[in-house]
Amino acid sequence: MPKMKTHRGAAKRFKVLKSGKVKRSRAYKSHLLTHKNAKRKRRLRKATYLVGTDAKNIKRLLPYS
């Protein structure tokens, strides 16, 4: 059986932790930041985790992580 290929787009956006959780960064932090308040931008800095079916689908795209 040949090796499975990693989905490179998913590999750049998600990390699978040792605990099995899938870590992701938050959206809406790339541009148009002047009208967003400091509290909102501070929250967007922090990473978060995928849950449920979303995490399962991403893990399928990242077979060797």
Image (cartoon, grey):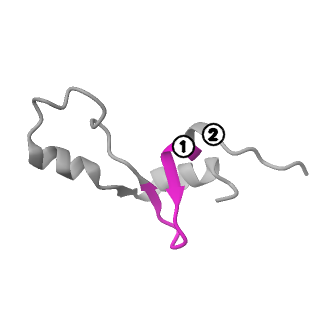
Q: Is residue 51 left or right of residue 6?
A: left
Residue 59: x and y, percent? 58, 55
| Quadrant showing the C terminus | bottom right
Residue 17 covered by magenta stretch: yes
Asked if the residue at tag 1 contacts the one at tag 2, i.e. Cβ–Cβ closer than 8 Å, the answer is: yes
Q: Nearer the viewer, residue 15 or 4?
A: 15
**Which span is picked out in magenta?**
11-23
Spatial distance from mark 2 to mark 1, Cα to Cα? 6 Å
Residue at the extreme bottom? 19
Q: Which residue occupies 40% across, 58% down?
A: 51
Residue 24: x and y, percent? 41, 51
Residue 47: x and y, percent? 34, 55
Q: Is residue 43 left or right of residue 30?
A: left
Task: Tell how many labels.
Answer: 2
Any mark on residue 8, and which?
A: 2
Q: Is residue 52 left or right of residue 17?
A: left
Mark 2: give few (<14), some (14-19) or many (20+) Cα within 10 Å: few
Quarter where residue 33 is shown = top left
State the SS at label 1.
helix
Q: Which residue occupies 69% across, 45% down?
A: 6
Above or below, comparing residue 23 to residue 40 in the picture: below
Residue 17: x and y, percent? 52, 66
Residue 19 covered by magenta stretch: yes
Q: Is residue 45 left or right of residue 39?
A: right
State the SS at label 2.
helix
Any mark on residue 12, and which?
A: 1
Above or below, comparing residue 40 to residue 55 in the picture: above
Residue type pointed to by label 2: Arg
Quarter where residue 27 is shown = top left
Q: Which residue occupies 14% across, 45% down?
A: 40
Residue type pointed to by label 1: Lys
Residue at the extreme top? 32
